[in-house]
């Protein structure tokens, strides 16, 4: 796109040809003749292209902010004093990777007690089982009473229950020891670690924040009129100011069925792989959602558009005159720009010498070798 102000057309100087003729004798005299003026004198030569229509995908444009795929404010499972921190802000962690250690001395003492209790319960259970088995053999032979036999069977059953209880207490004690190590709930990046060694934390305390940004989400605000056209799985292309010219490809992953009564817009969530982690949470994104339908649009080369006082315009060739037309532009790519309004299909627009034209200027249209005005093409 060329940017300049309107300039007046310079006068075209007409070259005069001089001719001399002489024939015998000293009295021969030179004569000067001016050729007749041509029809193109004073005309500005321009190359034109025909505005064409082409079917293009229907695009819904929206803006929004990138957010993590998952974010977690990690808390300690148990209360205790922090004895060591293992990560810092910016670190990349794996799932279940330790983040910090709590004082586990009391927990380990209770674990040792639970192990001893389980060993004692298992020994008592083994003895009770042996006594019950022996009493059963004696009862069968009539050497003991039924009541004695049933007492020992009951004692065996109780001993088994005591073993189960001791095992549960051991598992609880083991969990208390394990909980003294705070681990990452999933793989991601550490964005906060507000505690340090020596601090006392509880299950209500946030000890770290982990975010997953591969994939990453873009929360878009889509106008109510366009929101009804959007469906899950539609292709989305987004750009961020931090990476000029880079297009990130994703797809619509979720729709908020409620329309915001204040903005009259729906929140649409798009997901992007972001395997290289270039896009980070908080970045502002400009996105295009490609709908399955198509629409007809007009295109011209970007070189045919000029900017006058912050307004886009083109010169339309009508007969031998260049007429200035204010236009509204759409997408630009591959050297072509979409014209939303201002010109009609089949119009011929000038593509060169725009700085020499003014509204209503006389022009001479340059044609293609086949004698027709070349048509604009869109890939």
Image (cartoon, helix red, strand yellow):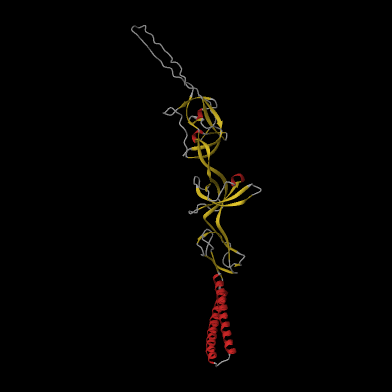
- Residue 137 percent coordinates (x, y): 52, 89
Tell which residue pokes out farthest to the left in this image: 24
- Residue 123 percent coordinates (x, y): 53, 84
Vertical side of 155 occupied by 69: above or below: above
Closer-to-camera residue (220/308): 220
| Residue at 53% in and 37% down | 297
Closer-to-camera residue (283/227): 227
Tell which residue pokes out farthest to the bottom in this image: 143
In the drawing, does residue 43 fall left or right of residue 222?
A: left
- Residue 299 percent coordinates (x, y): 51, 36
Vertical side of 6 occupied by 273: above or below: below
| Residue at 58% in and 89% down | 146
- Residue 36 percent coordinates (x, y): 45, 15
Closer-to-camera residue (259/277): 259
Total marks placed: 0
Closer-to-camera residue (189/198): 189
Vertical side of 332 occupied by 207: above or below: below
């Amino acid at each position: 796109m060329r940017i300049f102000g309107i300039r007046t057309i310079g006068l075209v100087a007409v070259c005069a040809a001089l001719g001399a003729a002489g024939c015998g004798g000293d009295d021969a005299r030179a004569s000067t003749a001016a050729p007749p003026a041509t029809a193109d004198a004073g005309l500005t030569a321009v190359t034109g292209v025909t505005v064409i229509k082409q079917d293009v995908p229907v695009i819904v444009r929206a803006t929004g902010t990138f957010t993590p795929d998952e974010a977690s404010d990690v808390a300690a499972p148990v209360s205790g004093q922090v004895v060591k921190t293992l990560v810092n802000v910016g670190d990349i962690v794996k799932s279940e990777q330790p983040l910090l250690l709590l004082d586990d001395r009391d927990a380990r003492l209770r674990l040792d007690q639970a192990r001893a209790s389980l060993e004692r319960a298992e020994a008592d259970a083994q003895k009770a089982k042996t006594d019950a088995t022996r009493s059963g053999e004696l009862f069968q032979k009539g050497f003991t009473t039924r009541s004695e036999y049933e007492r020992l069977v009951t004692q065996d059953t109780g001993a088994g229950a005591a073993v189960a209880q001791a095992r549960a207490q051991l598992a609880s004690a083991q969990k208390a020891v394990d909980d003294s190590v705070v681990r990452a709930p999933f793989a991601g990046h550490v964005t906060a670690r507000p505690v340090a060694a020596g601090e006392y934390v509880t299950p209500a305390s946030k000890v770290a924040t982990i975010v997953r940004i591969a994939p990453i989400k873009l929360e878009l605000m889509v106008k109510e009129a366009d929101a009804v056209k959007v469906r899950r799985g539609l292709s989305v292309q987004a750009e961020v100011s931090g990476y000029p010219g880079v297009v990130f490809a994703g797809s619509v992953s979720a729709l908020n069925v409620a329309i915001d009564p204040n903005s009259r817009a729906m929140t649409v969530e798009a997901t992007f792989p972001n395997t290289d982690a270039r896009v980070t949470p908080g970045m502002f994104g400009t996105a295009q959602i490609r709908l399955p339908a198509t629409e007809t649009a007009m295109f011209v080369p970007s070189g045919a558009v000029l900017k006058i006082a912050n307004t886009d315009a083109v010169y339309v060739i009508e007969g031998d005159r260049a007429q200035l037309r204010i236009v509204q532009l759409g997408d630009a790519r591959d050297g072509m720009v979409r014209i939303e309004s201002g010109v009609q299909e089949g119009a011929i627009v000038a593509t060169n010498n725009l700085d020499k034209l003014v509204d209503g200027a006389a022009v001479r249209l340059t044609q293609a070798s086949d004698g027709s005005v070349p048509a604009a093409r869109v890939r």
